[in-house]
Image (cartoon, rainbow, N blue to C red):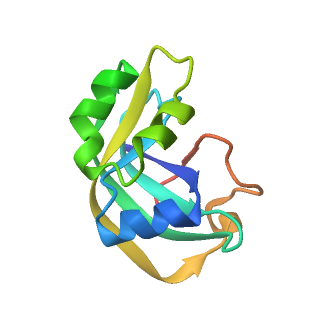
């Protein structure tokens, strides 16, 4: 059974995901199970769940290789990427497919979550 995760994303990156400029969400850890959707929680100052994105695939490889493969649709600078993955031998990226923006942003409590996830939290399908 496919699962969803909820992740915290800074507003600048949310804007780029929703506009289609950013097709990869980079992470230092990836979910271990078979996930097919990311629920996007936009951090301060919005502090709302704003969208749901399909996951095309999860990439896992050395940071330099991941950058070369994804840089055209990264939505971030190389410097930001290098800083984020500094000292890591493995980097992860969720390749984002279709994005559905919620008509009305939701609260974390609507998903049974009390505080913003540090990396990600599995959630029950809605």
Q: Could you say which quadrant of the image residue 45 lies in? A: bottom right
Asked whether 48 or 34 is in front, the reply is 48
Question: x%, y% of residue 4?
Answer: 45, 49
Q: Is residue 17 left or right of residue 113?
A: left
Above or below: residue 107 compared with residue 10: below
Q: Disc count in the image? A: 0
Direction bottom: furthest residue: 103
Q: Position of residue 29 (x, y in %)?
A: 52, 29
Question: Residue 31, relative to residue 117: is it above or below?
Answer: above
- Describe residue 87's horizontal placement relative to residue 33 as left or right: right
Query: Residue 66 is drawn in which quadrant?
Result: top left
Residue at coordinates 36% horizontally, 59% vertically from top-left?
Answer: 53
Indicate left or right for 9 with 66 as reference: right
Nearest the viewer among 51 and 9 is 9
Q: Residue at x 71, y 54 (%)?
A: 116
The picture places residue 100, in percent across and down from the top left corner, at 35, 71
Residue 115: % across, % down: 76, 55
**Image quadrant for the N terminus?**
top left
């Amino acid at each position: 059974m496919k699962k969803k995760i909820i992740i915290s994303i800074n507003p600048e990156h949310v804007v780029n995901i929703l506009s289609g400029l950013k097709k990869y969400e980079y992470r230092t850890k990836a979910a271990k199970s078979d996930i097919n959707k990311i629920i996007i929680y936009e951090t301060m100052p919005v502090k709302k769940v704003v969208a749901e994105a399909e996951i095309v695939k999860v990439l896992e490889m050395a940071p330099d290789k991941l950058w070369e493969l994804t840089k055209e649709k990264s939505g971030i600078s190389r410097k930001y990427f290098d800083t984020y993955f500094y000292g890591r031998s493995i980097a992860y990226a969720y390749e984002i497919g279709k994005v559905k923006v919620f008509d009305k942003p939701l609260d974390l409590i609507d998903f049974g979550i009390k505080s913003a996830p540090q990396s990600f939290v599995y959630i029950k399908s809605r």
